[in-house]
Amino acid sequence: MPDFAGALGASKAASALLVLFIPSKDRRNKPMDQRYWVKETLNVFGTLFGGATAFPRGDGIWRDDAQGGKLLFDNPVVIHGYTSEHLIEQKLLVLRDFLHRMGREARQGVIGLVINDDYLEIGFPLEEAPAPKQRKGKKRS
């Protein structure tokens, strides 16, 4: 393979691609604070791997098999970052903690991450739906 980095005078050559999908809704199809998670992800990727880019919202769909195959439409932001496999291995536990925190706090069914050519899906259990609020009525005597 040609030495493109050397030929171009590049000071960095990173060959491991990270792609993370930031959903716009939670598993119950309720809007979530997507902007918060985009900023958090950019901060984590920048700190751990040197940088990343968030692409504008797109149209997406996800099938939630734990909800009987329910189709959930979404407008995810896609974040790309390049790094080395060595650095991913070094920072794996911190990355794992972040992905699991996002999945839990954003109430997701899964978090989808791509490393190079591999799509990795981190699943989260289906939470019970909150009970409907009781209306307050007049007390009977």
Image (spheres, helix red, strand yellow):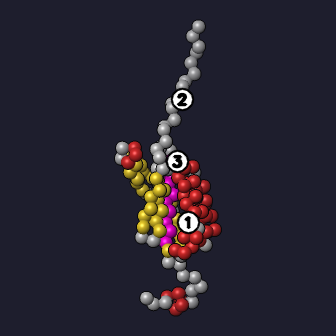
* Badge 3 amino acid: Arg
Whole-percent x, y for residue 141 in the image: 59, 7
**Looking at the image, which is closer to me, 101 or 137?**
101
Say what secondary structure mark 3 lies in: loop
Q: Is 18 part of what is drawn in magenta? A: yes
Whole-percent x, y for residue 53 in the image: 55, 68
Q: Is residue 139 above or below residue 37?
A: above
According to the image, label 2 marks what residue?
Answer: 133
Q: Is residue 6 above or below residue 72?
A: below
Say what secondary structure mark 1 lies in: helix
| Left or right: where 26 falls relative to 42 | left
| Span of residues in magenta | 17-27
**Looking at the image, which is closer to me, 113 or 73?**
113
* Badge 2 amino acid: Lys
According to the image, label 1 marks what residue?
Answer: 92
The CA distance from mark 2 to mark 3 is 20 Å
Residue at x 50% of width, y 78% of height: 15
Say what secondary structure mark 2 lies in: loop
* Badge 1 amino acid: Leu
Whole-percent x, y for residue 1 in the image: 43, 88
Nearer the N terminus, badge 2 or badge 1? Answer: 1
**Looking at the image, which is closer to me, 105 or 7?**
105
Q: How many marks?
A: 3
The mark lying in front, picked from 2 and 3, is: 3
The CA distance from mark 1 to mark 3 is 22 Å
The CA distance from mark 2 to mark 1 is 42 Å
